[in-house]
Amino acid sequence: MKTSRAVANTDNSYSPPPSSSTPPIWRLLVVLVALVLLPALPYAASQGPPMSGAVNDTSGDHASDAVTRARGPVAVPEASEKTLHYYRSGNVLWLINMAWALLIPALFLFTGFSARIRDVAQGIGRRWFFVIATYVIIYFAVNYLLKLPLNYYQGFLREHEYGLSNQSLGKWFGDSLKSLMVTIVGGMLFVWIPYLLIKKSPRRWWLYTGIAAVPVMMLFMLVQPIWIAPLFNEFGPMHDKTLEAEILQLADRAGIDGGRVFEVNKSEDTEAVNAYVGGFLNTKRIVLWDTLVQKLDRDQVLAVMAHEMGHYVRGDIWKLLLLFSGLILMALYAIYRLMPPLIQEFHSRFGFDDPADIASLPLILLLLSTSPLVLAPVAMAYTRHIEHEADRFGLELTRDSHAMASALLFLQKENLANPDPGPLYKFWRAWHPVLADRIRFANTYRPWETGKPLKYGALIHQAK
């Protein structure tokens, strides 16, 4: 569950936000349901056993405390000059992307181009649904072309410049076209919903659209692992069957049953490492990038997977859905109040005077592009808490502080992540606790050594 990019994620995430080789689904859902914060939903889509009182579990297949202590704490790294340059240029690109997200919709609106696209769509589609579908195709295709130079630089040239990408130009371009196709198909299937609601209920459409967001998100989470993700990379069985068995044993101890383990061929795209536990119902799966398996040792891989399993069994996706439902309604209500006066003021420039006109889509996107400046810090504060608790769960599950800390250290070096960014970055961009704080916590959190109860002991099963 999402942009920020996993292959160079300065949040040091184990969970995979969208990357240049995955479709910008969050942008599509912004259009559909005003889900401006979908990138924060990469977690597993299933709820584990409910948390009861803390239990001090002293069993399980984990590294011995003596061995963990012998290896000692992991030092917080100093950022290299290359890392700092990547970090600073990433901040500049973040600002450019924010400005671009405002500029393109404004360009469509104030030049009257959106209204002309609608006119063309009406001539082709004629019926209301097909007019919307035709508009979606044209709008997203033009938007793709306008942003292609920027995407090419930040998704291909820049990643190669810093040694983070293995993609050929053909692979990158092919993935970007697949991303466009997925966005267009999704738009054709769902963009009509908010416009129908605006038409049928001008005063309550924002409420009904917010409610409709939840099943749309759940549908996406159901189909994304089996239909969308495999479009971009090959998902296959793990080659290391011994490690696979250890991961499944760890999953069993975490209370995750029925999941399948997949190894993704990401080395054709990137040098970075990542993993996640995702899906729900019959799409439940444990996914590791092949780069993770190749570059980390056994204990580090298990520490990474224990963190991801923590998201799954704690039911983080449902907590985030509840939070985001409220934020979505706030964003939609703001749009509901702001659209009419803006249309009244600029209708001659826009070429439409009705919010239910599909030509208003860029106006909705323009207003939504300002929402992260207000709402994202709220969501980020909560997701940082969730990530911290997933670290805690992973440590309690494996009891291998050194493996967790050293895995984070490796992730920092491999992904060129700034271990201790500034306060503004933390406030506006950090979905995860900064790496320095995570390493320090991994080094010091050992309640099992002093006989203190484990916070998530009730969720950890004894080894069979």
Image: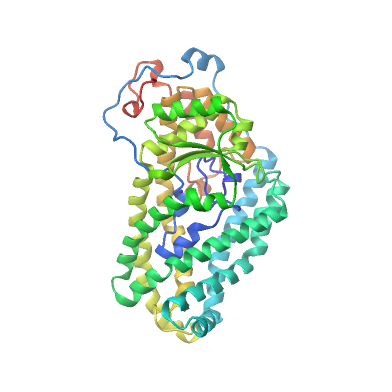
Using the image as rendered, state which of residue 101 and residue 378 is in the foreground: 101
Q: In the rendered view, tell whether residue 303 sits above or below residue 229.
A: above
> In the image, residue 154 lies at what x, y percent?
65, 55
Q: In the rendered view, tell whether residue 24 sits above or below residue 399.
A: below
In the picture provided, is 181 more to the left or to the right than 31?
Answer: right
Does the rendering let one see residue 2? no
State which quarter of the image contains the C terminus: top left
> In the image, residue 317 lies at what x, y percent?
38, 45
Does the rendering let one see residue 70? yes
User: Residue 263 sits in which quadrant?
Assistant: top right
Query: How is the structure coloured here?
Result: rainbow
**Residue at x 52% of width, y 29% of height:** 244
Number of marks in the image? 0
> In the image, residue 382 lies at what x, y percent?
39, 45
User: Residue 100 sits in which quadrant?
Assistant: bottom right
Residue that lies at the very extreme toward the left in this rendered image? 53
In the picture provided, is 326 more to the left or to the right than 183?
Answer: left
**Residue at x 42% of width, y 65% of height:** 32
In the picture provided, is 297 more to the left or to the right than 29?
Answer: right
Q: In the rendered view, tell whether residue 282 sits above or below residue 219.
A: above
